[in-house]
Image: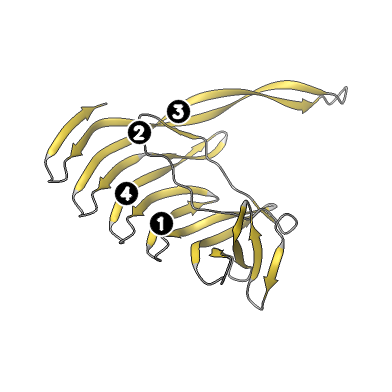
Amino acid sequence: MKFCNVLCVCLLVGSAHAQSVIPFKYTSEEDNRLVKENDSLKYYEATGDPLNVVAINEETMHYQLVVGKDKKKVLAEGDIVGENDNYLQSGRWVQYHPNGRVQLAGNFYRGKPVGTWEENYPDGKVKKVYNFGLISDKDGLITCLSGEYREYYNDGNLKVSGYYAADRAKKSETVQVEDPISGKNVNSTISKSVYTARKAGTWEYYTADGEVERKDEN
């Protein structure tokens, strides 16, 4: 089986906040050099990351991105699930700050972020809380930032409060396919759904003292 990174078709508009992706740096046994193995774990060179390695427990289906020097400090981890020729992120995943505290945590479904996600400051206090909706479309399952969004100051006071809505649109692109009659490559136009995360309703912005600084109507 091969690992792959799965990208959702979701654009974020009108916000500096971008979708966070927990590092998943394994392609396949053929593409990632095996560093060492023991009874429970196999260690591979991390894809695009010469300093760290990936540890995979094939019995428990668990993935860890670990510091390459001692292979003990975990940078990110979570469970994986097999699907066709790929492994996908599944269930709860966590990324850590250098001090070991949780930096980012949330759930995946078949490689797509879903549900409530939380980002934390290095001291462990909550920085942001936001949600990903899982949308069933004729093009398949699509995930997009949607629902309540909250951002906090380091002292715990609310900084930003608002709501994202997922807007659906169509995107066309030209791809090359093989003509079944001539056997030659020809251009074909296909369309797929694109969901845009849009600020909706009232967004409130607060000062560090907890006072309402402004309200934006979207």
Q: Position of residue 29 (x, y in %)?
A: 72, 59
Q: Nearer the viewer, mark 2 or mark 1?
A: 2
Q: Position of residue 116 (x, y in %)?
A: 37, 50
Q: Give the distance between the C-alpha atoms of the residues marked 1 and 4, in whole angstroms.
A: 10 Å
For marks 4 and 2, the one nearer the N-term is: 2
Q: Position of residue 84 (x, y in %)?
A: 68, 52
Per the image, the residue denoted by label 2 is 15
Q: Nearer the viewer, mark 4 or mark 3?
A: 4
Per the image, the residue denoted by label 1 is 105
Q: Is residue 216 above or below residue 27?
A: above
Are dots 3 and 2 in contact, CB under 8 Å? Answer: no
Q: Is residue 176 above or below residue 66?
A: above
194, 4: nearer the viewer: 4
Q: Quadrant of the N terminus?
A: bottom right
Q: Residue at the spot x=27%, y=45% of the render?
A: 150
Task: Specify the amino acid type for callout 3.
Answer: Arg
| SS at badge 2 | loop
Direction right: furthest residue: 182
For marks 3 and 2, the one nearer the N-term is: 2
Q: How crowded is the residue under tag 1: few (<14 C-alpha within 10 Å), some, or many (20+)?
A: many
Q: Nearer the viewer, mark 3 or mark 2?
A: 2
Per the image, the residue denoted by label 4 is 129
Q: Is residue 159 above or below residue 51?
A: above
Q: Residue at the spot x=45%, y=58% of the render?
A: 95
For marks 1 and 4, the one nearer the N-term is: 1
